[in-house]
Amino acid sequence: MVELSSIKELRSIVGEENAVEDPQLLESSAIDGVKPGIVLFPENIEQISEIMKTASRVSASVIPMGSGTKRGIGNKPLGADIVLSTKKLDRVKEHESADLVATAECGITLSALNSRLGARNQFLPVDPPHVNDGATVGGVIASNDSGPMRLRYGTARELLIGMKVVRADGSVFKGGSKVVKNVAGYDMPKLFVGSLGTLGIIAEATFRLYPVPESSKTYVAGFKSLDEAHGAVRSLINSNLVINALEQMDPGLSGSIEERLGMGLGRNIYALAVRIMNVTQAVEDQIKTVMEVSRRNGGEGVVIEGGDEEAFWNEVREFPWRSLDGASAVLKAGVLISDVTRMFLMLEELSDKYGVRAHASARAANGVVIVSVKGDSEPVLSSVKELREFSESAGGSLVVREASPEIKAAVSVWGDIGSPLGLMKRIKSGFDPGNILNPGRLF
């Protein structure tokens, strides 16, 4: 608990209107039931620096937070004296459209940033979940969250070229620059990607951008068997097509999307969605090839574009979070591309064995599988454990991305980190010797 004198000091840094102890706000800012003592809304990097100097001096725990869409990630925090909100750090500092580079404060939402960049026909090509809920640039970096378009553009890690961070002691770290090839030595900004706010408060970030494609279409095909769908995946991966997203869905998920959007795909099919974004003629030519490949492997489908296409991909990104009522878990597995089919089969076996409702969507050319498991607590927990055992025994990994409290308390969120854990702890200790930043969220 922060002492009263320190509370006064923190209030003086940000101003009374930006230091809030309202019970409702504290409740809504809680992480896994751990409520903060105060929520601060700094307006610039200098105020963040002063907050961290005070927090460091009195050993107050600090939770960085944007819109709160990543609160489900990680372990229950060991403390949350202060929630440091980045909501008022929402400016685009610089946009050099001729160089395809932009610098923004990290409290800006991804949708707001892309709206600004879109005025010059450019965008930051990351498509994580929760964009419509206000996912911020800082949160996307801190979690390295991504979506189906990672196949073409990579994740925030590949697009980030510079960063300003306030460290636990209040000092400001600046790494990288506006030049794409700017690293001579360690690429320090990359260290903060996926750090979950445990190494510093990400204040500003510089990204390389891409032009908005002239045209976009998606072919969604249905296959009667998993083998047919995977045959199409193999053919597409080995083709010369430039594919932006290649998503494979199990029958339960594809049926749910069909029910919501009515695309005319039918039920009980394994769906494969292929998105092409390019100049118009290239899109037309490549979609025809995708249709031919699908038909050769037994698939038939529909072409969607415009609002229907955006609605479809939004369904794919958000499906695990439609309802987290009751015992449930959202998992993110990383496996070999060739093991995606085995994982789909295992989900069907677990549904029969434990009576859970398990659905999956796979970034089929990346080996990333997003899984939703719902049911009674014990069956869900058993399913999570078996899926992790399968993933890790196959050389992959499985992270509990979000789960109901009883599930999260009974299983390791991150799984076996292995030998890098010691190095990670030494890095954390070096950047945050007092362990005040998001304590316990990672380890």
Image (cartoon, helix red, strand yellow):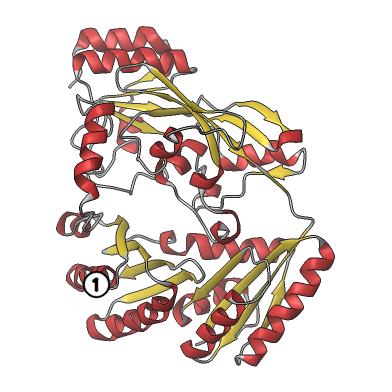
Q: On the rendered image, what quadrant is the N terminus found in?
A: top left
Look at the numbered disc 1 and give the secondary structure of its residue: helix
Q: In the displayed structure, does residue 209 sit left or right of residue 75?
A: right
Q: Residue at x 69, y 79 (%)?
A: 290
Q: Position of residue 149 (x, y in %)?
A: 58, 58
The answer to whether residue 125 is seen in the rendering is yes
The structure residue drawn at horizontal position 73% and vertical position 75%, both measured from the top left corner, is: 287
Residue 38 vs 247, above or below: the answer is above
Please report the residue visible at 28 percent of the width from the left and 27 percent of the height from the top.
431
Q: Is residue 360 above or below residue 65?
A: below
Q: Position of residue 52 (x, y in %)?
A: 32, 18
| Amino acid type of the residue that numbered disc 1 sits on in the rendered structure | Ser
Q: Which residue is mark 1?
A: 393
Name the quadrant of the C terminus.
top left
Quarter of the image where one finds residue 384: bottom left
Residue 261 image position (x, y, % from top left): 61, 71
Residue 246, picture quadrant: bottom right
Residue 60 shown left or right of residue 160 in the figure: left
Residue farthest toward the front in the current orientation of the protein: 184
